[in-house]
Image: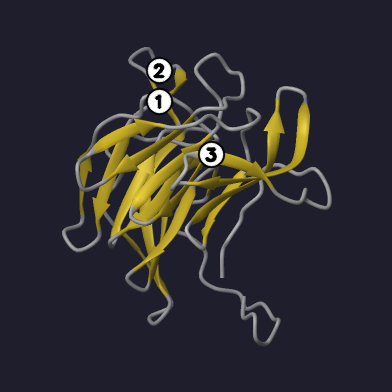
Amino acid sequence: YDPKADSWQPLPSMPTARSFLAAVAVAGNIYAIGGVNFDGDLCDAVEAYDPISDAWTRVASLPVARSDHTATVVDGQIYVVGGVVDNDEGEAVVTDRVHVYDPAAHSWQQLQSMPSARSSHSTAAVDGKIYVTGGFATSGESSDAFESYDPVINTWTTLANLGLARAFHASAAFNGKLYVFGGYSDSGWMDLVEVYSPASNTWASAADLPLPIDEVVAVAL
């Protein structure tokens, strides 16, 4: 999509068809990570799209196949957080596992796990830290958990909970604050927007979305 021309252009399809994946842009490439494949199985495929060559390349697979996870870029590294994985019995379960991908070395590394396992959550980076909001807990209920990860010291910190539990929502960083939009709570779809200030570890309400919505994406420009 070209915002200036307000027009769309078809591009080469991903080599692996999938849903419930995560995608990020780093070093000029777009990375499609994990998800659920055409057969309904969890997927470990990671593929990179280069806009200059207009081509996809298969890169190092995820150490653990997963879906309903997030991916966030900090200092050129891709951090994959939480989601759904298969346990030893082959059952789909919510995970607290975190991995980082180094595009230059084409390698993955496991990091300190989240304090709270969850899926269908949201992540965004503010001032070099990754903030994880909400999602579905292991109980299957939507969560109000809020935690941050510091890549420099590989440590998680538990922060002030969201005002309302939610999953399938979106978050974005803007002017040093974290904005959380919509989503799904145990009582239904949400139009609520909350704003987090890292300096005071507090949440405030912002203007509601025009309509309740979930499975939404937010991008700050």
- Residue 206 versus residue 43 in the image, above or below: below
Q: Which mark is residue 202?
A: 3
Query: Could you say where residue 35 lies in the image, as x and y percent from the top left?
Result: 48, 42
Residue corresponding to mark 2: 90
- Please name the amino acid that badge 2 sits on: Gly
In whole angstroms, how far apart are the C-alphas of marks 1 and 3?
27 Å
Q: Residue at x 76, y 51 (%)?
A: 207
Q: Are marks 2 and 3 in contact (CB under 8 Å)?
A: no
Residue 143 in the figure: left or right of residue 154: right
Q: Say what secondary structure mark 1 lies in.
A: loop
State how far apart marks 2 and 3 are (Cα).
Answer: 40 Å
The C terminus lies in quadrant: bottom right
Neighbour class for label 2 at 10 Å: few (<14), some, many (≥20)?
Answer: few
Which mark is first along the chain, 3 or 2? 2
Q: Residue extending furthest right?
A: 211
From the viewer's side, name the closer residue of 208 and 75: 208
Q: Which residue is mark 1?
A: 95
Label 2 residue SS: loop
**Residue 49 occupies quadrant:** bottom left
Percent from the top left, x then y, of residue 19? 56, 45
Residue 34 visible in the current orientation: no
Does 37 sit left or right of 46 as displayed? right
N-term mark: 1 or 3: 1
Identify the mark at residue 86; answer none if there is no mark. Answer: none
In the rendered image of this protein, does residue 174 appear above or below residue 28? above
Which residue is nearer to you in this view: 97 or 196?
Answer: 196
